[in-house]
Image: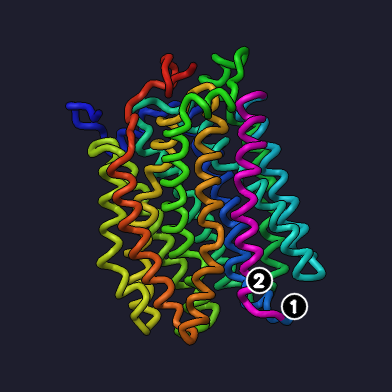
Amino acid sequence: MTSARRPPGLVAQLRALSVDQRHTLVACLLGWSLDAFDFFILVFGVKSIAEDFRTDVTAVTLAITLTLAMRPVGALLFGWAADRYGRHPTLMVNIVAYSILELASAGAPSLPVLIGLRSLYGIAMGGEWGVGAALALESAPLESRGAISGILQQGYPLGYLLASILFGVFFSWIGWRGMFVVGALPAGVVLYLRAKVPESPTWKKDATKPGDLRRALRAHFPRFLYLVVLMAAFNFFSHGTQDVYPLFLQKQRGLDPHEVGAVAVTYNLGAILGGLAFGTLSERFGRRRTIACAALLALPVIPLWVLAHSAVWLAVGAFAIQVMVQGAWGIVPAHLNELSPGSVRGTFPGLAYQLGNLVAAATATIETAIAASSGGNYALALGGMTAVVAVFLAVAAALGPEAKGVRFDAPGPTGST
């Protein structure tokens, strides 16, 4: 239920943060940004990797599929550790793990080895979001959750943006292996976490009574199942508009790496703008209504996004659709954490997110297969899937529960106990 008092805007919500809360937000944003950066390095390298290993792009997209498929394992393992041992140390271990695996990917001697390493990377990637979101939102004031949610989730398109710049500017010199080497740099974030970021005050309050995940799942199973379905729709929405799009630009529209990088930079700027705007607006209009509006507003943009031929108009369409896609996503961290039992907040939201991601893990493979069966028509595959998913997401969000404004330090199903 929304408050009668008009919620503060983005600037006011950010001003309400203390110095420690700002450091926490920055660290969690960097952790998710650089995790996504590492993921999208593979997305941009698909065509080149296929050529180097003398295979087709569909075979390489299996690495993307398995990365996504393994993320629930990471959400479970790292989420359990975060509930048991604290958000702060778990997040540091997680960042080191995905950085090491990124560096190892640079030296993969064959496609099967690369696929195996990306599967392990998926475990590390799957742990970061839930732990980071819990740490950031549990540390934030209640009235700032919408803005924090929008900013935190935009770590994903920010990582995509950084990968776009790396690909567009340096790929010709360093190749896909060099991009993976650069992807190992996020380990440095651990130093910032160690020096500047305190543990979640909510977790410290309940540290003596760690939650029982099985008990929480039994008690809240209908809600958990709903969140898995909702997050499956969200992941089809994002991965369906992002993972194959660079390949579409290269193969069907004939853009070179510099043009692809420029288009990707443009649409990731739209994604960041959308997440900030809709995340903040969700404090005023509610989580469900804002998600549904963002999803439906993507529909009229689809024709421009996939049917344009010039790089300029493709960039305009991609910018607009990512405003809506990541606008909806900007609400997810707050929405899931507010609907989570407090004693397992390190695990419950992240596990629901990543199980939904597992359902959508084959998005890239499905889209490339549809394109192949239609004579290489990636526009048909991208546009058709996005239209269906947008409608489903809007309906699922509108019909589900909402706990906006719940206190994380209060007893109850989404409070601290």
Q: Which mark is residue 53?
A: 1
**Badge 1 local density, few (<14 within 10 Å), some, or many (20+)?**
few
Q: Is residue 105 left or right of residue 208?
A: right
Magenta span of residues: 55-84
Mostly what secondary structure, the magenta segment? helix
Q: Residue at x 54, y 50 (%)?
A: 33
Q: Residue at x 66, y 77 (%)?
A: 48
Q: Is residue 244 left or right of residue 182?
A: left
Q: Which mark is residue 318?
A: none
Image quadrant for the N terminus?
top left
Horizontal and vertical percent position of residue 143:
33, 28
Is residue 59 in the magenta section?
yes
Which residue lies under the disc numbered 2? 60
Q: Is residue 166 left or right of residue 260?
A: right
> Does residue 255 show up?
no
> Spatial distance from mark 1 to mark 2, Cα to Cα?
9 Å
